[in-house]
Each structure stands twice: as C-alpha cells, then as structure tokens.
Amino acid sequence: MSRFAAPIAEQIWDMKYRFKAADGTPEDLTVEDTWRRIARDLAQVEKDPDHWEEEFYTALEDFKYLPAGRITAGAGTARRVTLFNCFVMGTVPDSMAGIFDMLKEAALTMQQGGGIGYDFSTIRPKGADVLGVAADASGPLSFMDVWDAMCRTIMSAGSRRGAMMATMRCDHPDIESFVAAKSDAARLRMFNLSVLVTDDFMDAVDKDASWDLKFGEKVYHTVQARDLWNKIMRATYDYAEPGVIFIDRINAENNLNYCETIAATNPCGEQPLPPYGACLLGSINLARLVTDPFGDTASVDEDALSELVATAVRMMDNVVDISNFPLPEQAAEAQAKRRIGLGVTGLADALLMTGLEYGTDEAAAQTEAWLKAIARASYLASVELAKEKGAFPLFDAEPYLASGTMQRMDDDVRDAIREHGVRNALVTSIAPTGTISLYAGNVSSGIEPVFAYAYKRKVLLRDGGRTEEEVVDYAVQMWRDRMGDAPFPDYFVNAQTLSPKAHVKMQAAAQKWVDSSISKTINCPEDISFEEFKDVYLEAWATGCKGCTTYRPNEVTGSVLSVSEAKPQEEQTTAAEQNAEAGGEVVYMSDPLDRPKGLEGRTYKLKWPDSPHAIYLTVNDIVINGHRRPFEVFINSKNMEHFAWTVALTRMISAVFRRGGDVSFVVEELKAVFDPRGGFWMEGKYIPSILAAIGGAIEQHLISTGFIETEGSGLKMDPTMQMGSGTKPTAKACPSCGEFEMRMLEGCMTCASCGHSKCA
C-alpha cells in the first residue's frame, strides 16, 4: 500500500527525490527506501550508527520531519553534491580581478547545486574613477549582468537552474538603478533583488529627512529619504521587486553578532548569512503532529514535537560533517559555527485542525507558542549535543547569551548553555517548502496560509493520454474524510481572502522565536492602493519582521492563480463548481493543435566551422489572434552523421511548441549546451556548441516575429488564448511542465502542477 497521501506526492518523489541510476533505473524502490537511505547516511558519523539510523528513520517516517530537498535527493547517493541548499558568497572586492574571482566561486558553487547570495554594495558606483586606467567604473549592475549570464549557463545539481540573491545598501550611489532594474522584464532574470534598509534610513523616512548616497567617504548624491522609499515601494508595487531586508535588525538580533557581520541572504531570504555562510534546512511537519484534528481536544502533541525536534537537530548537525562543500571557505565557515535552520511546514493546516483562523490574534498567539516550543527544544537538544560532541568552535558564552533569541529564552535554557555550551550557533529558520510540502501530501507550505483548498491538475499518462486529478489540501482532505459533506467552518480562510496585514501579523508572531529569518510572501490584491501597499512594509518594520516580500499581480511578472474570495461552504457535484467553491480557478494547457495544411516560416543557414556541410533550420509559425508564434521546426543537412539526433531534436522542439504558452525556455536550454570539444567564435560571439547555434537561430526568429522582445527575454505578448483553449491564462507558464499554474509562495514562483520552484 502506498505511503503517499495523494498521487501528486508520489509523482514529486519520483521526479525530484527518488534515487535513480544514471540510466534512470530506480535505486529507491519505495519511499521507505528513500527514508532508509537518508537515515543510514546521516547516522554514519555516530558512535552507534545502527541505533541512530533507526531513530532517524522514525523521524522521517510518515513525513513528520522533512529535510530540505538537497538532503532528501542527495544523502546516501555517493554523488558529489552539496547537501546545503544555498550560500552567501565572499565579500566582492572592488577590483576587476577580485570580481571575476568571485564569479568563478559562484560558478563552482552552482555546479554542485547551491544557490548563492551576494552583496553588490562593495563595488564602486557607475561613473566613479578607476585609478590607474583613466576610465570610469561601469558600476555594480553591469557586473550583476555578468553573474546573470553565468547563472543561465550553469545547470545545477538536479537539473535545475541556480538561484541567486543580490542585495544593495540603501545608501549606495547606484541604489536607484538597482531598484529600477527589474522594470526590464528581460534583465537580471536569475536574480532575486533586495534592498538592505538600515535603521537610520527608516528614521529618515519617518522624518522626511535628506539621505546621502555615498561610497566610502565620498557623497555622490543627496536625496530625500522618503522619495527613495517611495521609489522602492513603487518598483515593488509594479513588478514585485526588490524586497526589503532590515539589515541592522538582522545584525542586532544575530546570536553571533560578536564574531560576524551580515550583509546578504540566501536567494529566498530566510537565511541572512556572513561571507561563505551556508544554509542547512529542514522542516517539522506540524500537520502530522495534531491529535484529534477538528475535534474538541485538537492540539499539537508537544511531547512528540519536542522529541521530533531533538532528533531533527541531531540529523542536521550530522549533515555539517558529511556534506561536500564547493569551496574550502564554505566548509570552514560551516564547521566553525555549525548553524542550522530548522523550521516548520503545515502551520496553516495545523491551525485549521485546531479550529483557529489564520491571521487572527488567537492564531498568531498559537503560532508564537509553537515556534517557541520548537526553539526551546532545539536549543536543549543542541546543548545535549555539546555535552557529547563539543560546542561550536567560536562559542563565547557571555556575548552569545546577550544577543539574538537568547535574550528572550527561558532561564533554564540559558543556564544550560552557559554551563555546557551549545553545538549549533543558530538553530531555527523558516524556509520555502513548496515542493517538499507537496511531497508530504500537499500540506500547507511553511507558515503560509492555505493557498487553495483544491484544484484540478492535468496528468499525462504513460500511453500518451491525459486525465485530470484533484489536488486537495491536506487538512481539507482530512475534513472531508471525517466530516463528509459538512460545510466548512467560518475559520477556513485562504491566501486570497486574507488582508495583507493578517499575513504580516503571522510573520511577526513567528519571527520572535526564529533565529534567522522567514521566507514568506504577502500576497496583495491587484487593486490594492499604493498607499495601502506601502503600509504593509511599514507594518512589517513596526512589528519586528526582519524583511518583507510582497506579491501583487502585475504585467512584468504576471498574475497568480485567480481565487474567488467567496468562502467555500459545501462540496458541489461538478468539477468546475467544486473547483470554484474550493477557491481556485485554474486554467489548463490545452491539447496540441492539429497541423494546418499550410504554414508560413523561414529557413536559416548555419555553417558550423567543424563540419563541411551547412545546416538548414526551418521554423514554421502559426497565427493565433493576430500573433505569430512558433509551431514546428525542421533541420536538414547533407551530413548524415547527425541524422538521428536532428530528427529527435526537431520532434521534441515541435512537440513543445505545439503545447503553447511561453516556450522561450527552449532557446535558453539549447544555448546552454556546451560541447566538450569546445565551441567557436561566430559573428563576434562565442557559440559553445552546434546545439547552441541552433538555439540562437531560433531565438533570432522569435525576435523577428515579435514573439520575444530581445535576446534572453521571455514571452513578449501575453497570449490571449492558450493554443485555442479560449481562456486567458491567469498565471505564468511553468518552465518545467508548461502548465499555467505558477504561484508566488514564500518568495518563490512555484508550480502547483509539478512542484517546480527556483528556490526549493
């Protein structure tokens, strides 16, 4: 019998976490094999590995403890990958040689599967003097473009693109250009952007005072602080970036502020880290720990919670010792501080099961209580590890106990730390869990509210046919199983029915007992006024949050799945009615169009220097609502050596084109292919392979027909029809499965259909 609560959970496991041989043969025959593989690998450093393997397996069983995706996919596979999700890289030197040394480090880190964060505030502003070469500096954004191009060509472990965070201080002379960078939909697509906001700046905003933009001791410009704040807010209102990081608060609240300074975060913001710091993540599934769900005595079993937390802390501490690291500096940093990021998922489901309405004072108080229990149990477990294995090397009791979460911690915990030390410098963080939450049975993600109670998902069958399956939230399915057709209680709310300030309230409640930070998205309605939108950030500042990320549907990044604000009351008979009542209107990709008898197209001649024969590439288009879009490709050449792969390639590309949506990712994938024998310079550009040349030719065709705007950009026009479906897409197309089901969760665009996420 399957241990999975829903078909989508098994599919996510098979696609992302199941260990398979190089030829695709499964090594993990069941999910129990996956749990066993992880438990055995993490127990190998213990004095009694057999005992701890069983303890670790019990924690993993039934999805109670969910290690982050890197651990679940990589532990016990003997593959040379890092088990750490992401890193903040070294401080970028303000020199050409130093900058490109950092670029090399970034590439090596991404190659092993790590996302990266950088502070670009250390690079002199555009137009500044470059001593010794009689030139003006090009500024940090020009180098960010180089990083962006590098990221687009490095395929990270698990066959997904790397994720990057770029930060810049609010007093850097180029901050206004940084804030406006994402207004160009084709620029810095591989980056998340956040402004490092200081306490002094927020004070200047409050007083409407002037604000100096400076580098070193030189003041380049002086602006009104409130005007700059409004520019940040307007950019975020219009195209969802940049985010805001309250950097002084982060450093003041850091347990390690006596031995490190933080200036950047990992790509999704939940881990503010020093240079070469790494984030090690895992989540307690609160939804699995509720006893008597929806009953009179419903509650989280706190004894079981404490026991599970203690085992999870030990597992994560062991990861520090068994993981590969892309760079020796990263290994040294991890060993010196042994920071971990234990968080939660399924919070909103747990609140539903215990009869609490997400966003209310009661729910916030319960969230704070649960997070305090986790923090307390984590530190006590880390003290026990310190007794057994030693405290982290940089532990210094008095400054440690005078900072961060320690100032609020119970006296018995503080006394234990003072006497015995602590193994892990920081223990809690709340990371994006979109994919692992689907894997765990579609529990609510992180501390986010339930996004939609249910939605329909199209599934491609092995015989090429298609079927639909309903994906139901874990708590909602439990309600159905126990209560049948009984209407939902009033406390059932979802992300679309909540006010932005309700989101902030929950984030602030959780932050009090989270050492690091929280990855959370505050979803705002499209029609929210700009003044009300700005108040969300001021509320986050006033209530103690360490940062704020919002998402408002917009033309640049697209909309999200539209959800009715009407509260669902009872199940209906038809799928469409049921889906609407459940709070989700989902648009599906249509079946491929039949080929018309005649199509217009163009043929391009490619001369690859390594081949005596030219390649002729034909791209045919179809017209939908007056817009040309690619429909099929053909590749011909006298060189029969490549006949098989060219036929396969044309069929694959044509099949993708006929599915519709934003298919520009095909170009990116082809252009990223490198030939191990080396490429060639062609028309002033280095082309790494013949496949990359084909990708470039297709890209130029898409530009010439108006399908995309410029090189490296996505879809130019929002298609008003999905290949003839007659319905306007309500979300962006997923780059992995192509379905229009991308939603913003925890700071990351996540696909509800296949679980694709840039961050998880």
Image (tube, rainbow, N blue to C red):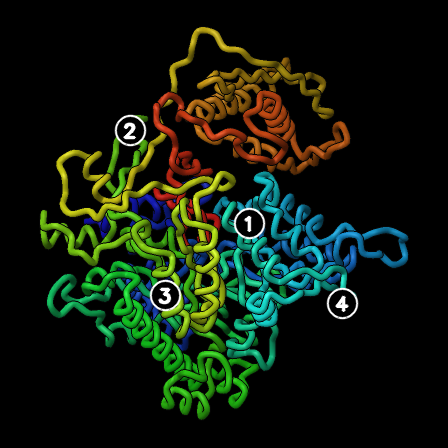
Tag 2 or tag 3, which sits nearer the N-term? Answer: 2
What type is the residue that disc 3 sits on? Lys
Q: Which label is found at residue 466?
A: 2
How far apart, in angstroms, are the residues tagged by discs 4 and 3?
Answer: 38 Å
Can residue 729 be seen? Answer: yes
**In 3D space, how far apart are the residues under numbered discs 4 and 1 (Cα atoms)?**
27 Å
Question: Is the C-beta separation of discs 1 and 2 under 8 Å?
Answer: no
Marks 1 and 3: CB-CB under 8 Å? Answer: no
Amino acid of disc 2: Arg
Would you call the spot at circle 4 few (<14 residues within 10 Å), some (14-19), or many (20 or more)? few
Q: Position of residue 52 (x, y in %)?
A: 34, 72
**Quarter occupied by residue 42:** bottom left
What crowding class fits label 1: few (fewer than 14 Cα within 10 Å), some (14-19), or many (20 or more)? some
Hey, which quadrant is residue 608 in on the image? top right
Q: CA distance from mark 1 to mark 2?
A: 41 Å
Point out residue 250 in the picture as x, y percentages from the top left corner: 53, 71
Pair 3/2: label in front: 3
Q: Three-letter amino acid code at disc 1?
A: Ala
What's the distance in space between the residues labelled 4 and 2, CA to CA? 61 Å
Q: Residue placed at 60% from the left, 16% from the top?
A: 640
Among the two numbered marks 1 and 3 on one chain, the one whose residue lies closer to the N terminus: 1
The answer to which of 373 and 560 lies nearer the viewer is 560
Of helix, strand and loop, which one carries label 1? helix
Marks 4 & 2, CB-CB < 8 Å contact: no
Q: Is residue 52 left or right of residue 106?
A: left
Circle 2 sits in a helix, a strand or a loop, which is it?
Answer: strand
Q: Quadrant of residue 373?
A: bottom left
Q: In the rendered image, which residue does mark 4 sit on?
A: 216
Disc assigned to residue 505 = 3
- How crowded is the residue under tag 3: few (<14 C-alpha within 10 Å), some, or many (20+)? many
**Residue drawn where x is 60% and y is 22% of the image:** 701
